[in-house]
Image (cartoon, helix red, strand yellow):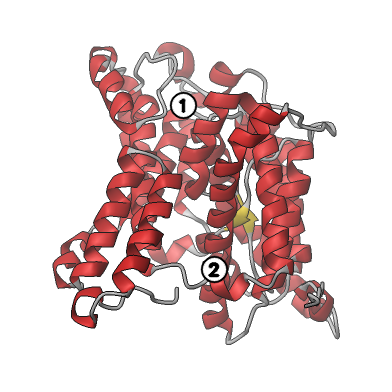
Amino acid sequence: MAISISFRPKLFDALNNYSSAQFRRDFMAGLNVMTVAFPLSMAFAIASGVRPEMGLFTAIIGGSIIAALGGSRVQIGGPTGAFVIITYGVVQGYGLNGLLLCTMMAGAMLCVMGFARMGSIIRFIPYPVSRAFTKGIAILILSSQIKNFLGLSVEKLPVDFVGKLQLLAGNLDTIHWPTVGLAVASVSLIGWWPARLSRDVPGAMVGLIVVTVVVDVLGLHDKWQIATIGSQFGEFSRHLPPFQIPTAGWPTVRELIQPAFTIAMLVAMQALLSAVVTDGMLDDRHDSNQELVGQGIANMVGPFFGCIPVTGAVARSVVNVRSGARTPIAGISHAVLLLVVLLVAAPWVSRIPLATLSAILVVAAYRMVSWKQFARLTKWPFSDSSVFVATFALTVLTNLTLAVEVGVVLASLLMVRPPDIAGDVFRVF
C-alpha cells in the first residue's frame, strides 16, 4: 500500500492576501512573546545542564523553523520544562555531543511519524498519563532548583530524585542567605505581578530586569557574592554557534534510541496539545501531521547549531494568540527579535543572578503542578487514578521513559476490564 506524503506548512496558506495591518499585529504579538521566551529559554537551558545561550539558540532557530514549516498558524516553539530532566540525564551520561545527537534522532522519528500520518493517533495518549508525567516533571524541576535557590555549595547534582535530595540535604549547612533573600524577592515579584498587566509585560521579564538592575546598581555581586550567569558560565556569547555535526559510535547511538524516542513523544504530545488549545481560541484547525514534520525538521536541524530539544510551548502560544497573532509570521518575528536581543544585550545578560532564573522556574513549575488535581483523584474512576499515581511515582522516582511506557501499558490493560473498573481512561487532550 502506497503512502501519500504531503508537505504544506500553514505559512503557505497564511501568506495568501496577507496585509500590512496583519503584519503589524503579528509583529507586536511576536514582541510580546519574546519577552516571555527570553527568560524562560535561558532558565530551561541551565536546568537542562547546558549553557544559557543554548536556550536562546533553540528558541531562535527551532522556533523559526516550527513557525515556518509547522501545521499550526500560531505555534511558538522553544525549550520547555518537559525536557529538563531527560536532557539533563543525557548530558550527564553522554555529554553535550550526545544530547545533540539524541535530539537529531528524535527529530528524525518525528518526521517519520508525520509522514506516516500518526498525528491524530498521538493525540489519544491516555489522559492520566499525560497529566501525571507533567506534574512529575514539575516536581523534578522544583528539586533541581533547590541548589541555586538556596545558594548551596554543590558542584554537580545527580540525575535521580532521591540521590539529589540526599546530596542537597547533606549540604544544607552551606545555605547562602543573601541568595535566598534574592530568590524569595524574585518569586514574590514574579508570582504577584498583576494578571491584568501580564499580557503586555510578563512577570518573569519584570522580575528578571528589576532584580538584575538592583543587584548591579548596588554592587551586590561582590558585596554579597551573588552568583550570576557570568560568574557561573563565563562570558555570554552573542553569536550563533558555528555549524557542527554531532557524531558517536554505534554503541552510543544504540543507547540513545530510548531517550530519543521519549523526547520525540514529548515533543509530539506537547506540540499537538498546544495546537489544540490555540485552535479552540481561534476556531481554527491545525494539520497534526504537518506539525509533526515541522517539529521534526526543527529538532533535526537545530543540533547542527547547538540547539537542545524544541517543541510547541502552550503558554507562549496562548500569549501569541491573545496578543493578536493570526499567522506564523508572529512566531518568526519572535525568533528574529530574540536574535536582536542576543546580539545587543549579551554583556547585560551575564549580570543576571542565577537565583532569579531559579525563581522563574520555581514559579513556572509550581503553576504546572495544579495541586487541586491531586485532591480530585478520589473522585476519578479507580483505573484513572491508579494510572495517574503509578505514572507520577515512576516519573519522580525512576525516569520519564519508564513512566510513560508503564503508564500507557497499564492504561491499555485496564481498557479490557469491565467498564465499572476501567473507567474513562482514554480521553482526547
Toward the viewer: 100 or 116?
A: 116
Q: Which mark is residue 171?
A: none
Mark 1 closeness class: few <14, some 14–19, many ≥20 residues within 10 Å: some
**Residue situated furthest front in the rendering:** 1
The C terminus lies in quadrant: bottom left
Q: Which residue is painted at 58% across and 63% down in the image?
A: 271
Up the image or down, 206 lies above or below 249; here it is below
**SS for callout 1:** helix
Residue appearing at x 57%, y 28% in the figure:
91
Estimate the x, y position of residue 27 in percent, counting from the top left.
Answer: 73, 65
In-front residue for pair 403/71: 403
Residue 179 visible? The answer is yes
Which residue is painted at 55% across and 73% down in the image? Answer: 121
Q: In the picture provided, is 174 more to the left or to the right than 290?
A: left
Task: Determine contact: label 2, label 1, CB under 8 Å.
Answer: no
Residue that label 2 marks: 122
The quarter in which the N terminus is drawn is bottom right
Cα distance in 3D space between marks 2 and 1: 46 Å
Q: Which mark is residue 215?
A: 1
Does residue 411 lie above or below 297 as drawn? Answer: below
Q: Measured from the top left, where is residue 333 in percent x and y?
A: 75, 60
Where residue 135 appears, as percent x and y from the top left, is 34, 53
Q: For label 2, count other residues whose C-alpha is less than 10 Å away and answer few (under 14), some (14-19) or many (20+).
A: some
Taking the spot 68% from the left edge, 54% from the top edge, the residue there is: 109
- Percent across and percent down for residue 100 are 68, 36
Residue flagged by tag 1: what amino acid is it? Val
Secondary structure under the numbered disc 2 in the rendered image: helix
To which quarter of the image does residue 153 belong?
A: top left
Tag in front: 2 or 1: 2
- The residue type indicated by label 2 comes to Ile
Query: Visible in this render: residue 64?
Result: no
Of mark 2 and mark 1, the one earlier in the sequence is 2
